[in-house]
Amino acid sequence: MTTPVVAAGPRRRAAAFLHRHAGVRLSLLLSAPLAWLGLAYLGALAALFVTAFWSTDVFTGDVVRVFTWANFHDLVTGDVYRTVALRSVGVAVAVTAIDLVIAFPMAFAMAKVASPRAQRWLVILVLTPLWASYLVKAYAWRVMLSSDGVLGWGYGLTATILTLSYLWLPYMILPIYAGLERLPGSLLDAAGDLGARGWRTFRTVVWPLTFPAVVAGSIFTFSLSLGDYITVKIVGGKSQLIGNVVYDNIGAANNLPFAAAVATVPVVIMLVYLAAVRRTGALDNL
């Protein structure tokens, strides 16, 4: 006597289909976070770009939702805004360079010199500053840099660069550490056996293989420095960066459309930076 075959129900057929098609299963799993990303991030960027083409009524202060190029015309033709943009890029480059010089030997010591037990403690120590408040750390540097502080260097661009370098240093150390940890020690031993000294080993073996990790760290330090405005307010003195111009136009000037137009500048700069990095192939190896 044969057992009758019972047709699989809709749920069982759906489960079998998802089991056979891993790509569909993954797409369904990621649909909710991707939808939130599109709404919260891409939607906010779209609103930013749309607002940048509006204007503000000089008498009432109301936003006039009529398309105009006036904000971007003022950005391009105003010497002060070009100066602020170049200054902001210079600060971001300086912070990235300082963090790279400090982070690379620290990450190398963590990944290739320290014992496995010490590595865990060193990673914790690198992460510890991230647990403290941003404002607490920035004001601590303000106290140290004040005229009667420990350093007494005063406020300005130098103070801004030093403070930002400290704030974003962990974001450079951790990617480089991860990249160096994946670097096989046998390659370093082979380079030494072939007679390569320290600098040549670094230049021909270590640097090419860890360059994608350096790029990952630079994306953090560069972008975070480019858009920062709080540190400049605290230790920057009379210096102005892009973030300050955006903040002042939202608050004191009450000119939201122009603030949105200024905010597109760091977005464009980062897109150009990422495009330049992509041409090197570094992003393909992250």
Image (cartoon, grey):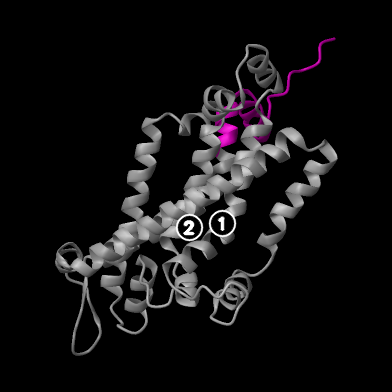
Residue 18 drawn at (x, y percent): 62, 30
Question: What's the residue at 68%, 67% (across, down)?
Answer: 132
Which residue occupies the foreground of this view, 34 or 246?
246
Q: Nearer the viewer, mark 1 or mark 2?
A: 1
Q: Of the residues shown, which amino acid type is indicated by label 2? A: Leu
Which residue occupies the foreground of this view, 147 or 94?
147
Q: CA distance from mark 1 to mark 2?
A: 8 Å
Check residue 17 for magenta coloring.
yes
Q: Which SS does the magenta portion mostly show?
A: helix
- Which of pointers 1 and 2 lies earlier in the amino acid sequence? 1
Q: Which residue is mark 1?
A: 168
For label 1, the SS is: helix
Q: Which residues are magenta?
A: 1-27
Which residue occupies the foreground of this view, 113 or 5?
113
Q: Are marks 1 and 2 in contact (CB under 8 Å)?
A: yes
Residue 253 drawn at (x, y percent): 30, 83
Q: Which residue is mark 2?
A: 224
For label 2, the SS is: helix
Q: From the viewer's perspective, tell me whether residue 154 is left or right of residue 130.
A: left
Question: What's the residue at 49%, 74% (across, down)?
Answer: 235
